[in-house]
Amino acid sequence: MREPRDRIKPALRFIRIHFRQPLSMRQIAAAAGLTPAYFGQVFAKAVGRTALDVLNEMRVAAAIGELMEGDTGIGRIAASVGFKQRRHFGRVFKQMMGLPPRQYRQRHSSAKGVVAAKAPPLTRHVFGGPVDCGCGNSELIWVLARLQCAQCGGPAKPYKGDPDLLFEQDLLTTLPHPPDA
Ligand SMILES: [Zn+2]
């Protein structure tokens, strides 16, 4: 019998590539050739989180990029990261980052006040492929509208290795992040 991690790999890849589209659990499970109920069990066993948690984290990470970059409306950002309803996006965002999208933007991107905003662990998979400063640290922060390494301050660069492997490693090593302090 195959290991849970091997069985869910196609679904991880599917999430990594398609997270900006509205996805159903049925579609994600189908990518792994499993029924939604069985997929849920196998995924939880393999990763220790649900596929929905992972999907939401990718989406929030992408949304933060858009929040930091300019003044695009929250509703448009929600839609561009795969949420059908703005309110649902707001709830998920607040639960993960500790404050609603609009306040997050105000706190972290005003020209005077901002220092740095913590990015969710999976952020590096969201922007132009997995990014990596090269120092081996995987924690990234936003400083104004730029993503950089929290440790060396270096700019994040596209990762050269296998993106699926890195994604899997990050899922297995990152714990649920604390709310933005
Ligand atoms: Zn670094």
Image: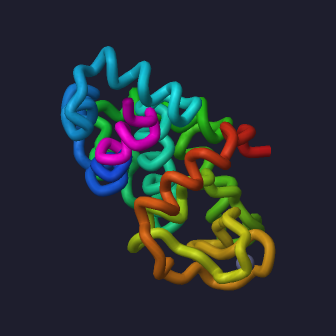
The tally of labels here is 0
Is 99 situated above or below 136?
above
What x and y, as percent, mark residue 57? 50, 43
Quadrant position of the C terminus in the picture: top right
- Where are the magenta residues, as a range? 1-11
Looking at the image, the residue that sits furthest to the top is: 37
Is 119 situated above or below 147?
above
Q: Is residue 79 left or right of residue 137?
A: left
Looking at the image, the residue that sits furthest to the front is: 1
| Residue 175 position by quadrant | top right
Identified at 23% across, 46% down, the residue is 21
| Residue 127 position by quadrant | bottom left
Is 84 situated above or below 136?
above
What x and y, as percent, mark residue 75? 33, 43
Q: Is residue 87 magenta?
A: no
Question: As rendered, which of 11 and 97 lies closer to the eye?
Answer: 11
What x and y, as percent, mark residue 42? 42, 25
Identified at 23% across, 21% down, the residue is 35
Where's ligand 1: which quadrant?
bottom right
Question: As rendered, which of 131 and 84 lies closer to the eye?
Answer: 131
Identified at 31% across, 15% down, the residue is 37
Quadrant position of the N terminus in the picture: top left
Q: What colour scheme governs how the chains and residues are painted in the rendered image of this protein?
A: rainbow
Residue 71 visible in this rendered orientation of the protein: no
Is 151 situated above or below 34?
below
Residue 112 visible in this rendered orientation of the protein: yes
What x and y, as percent, mark residue 119? 63, 57
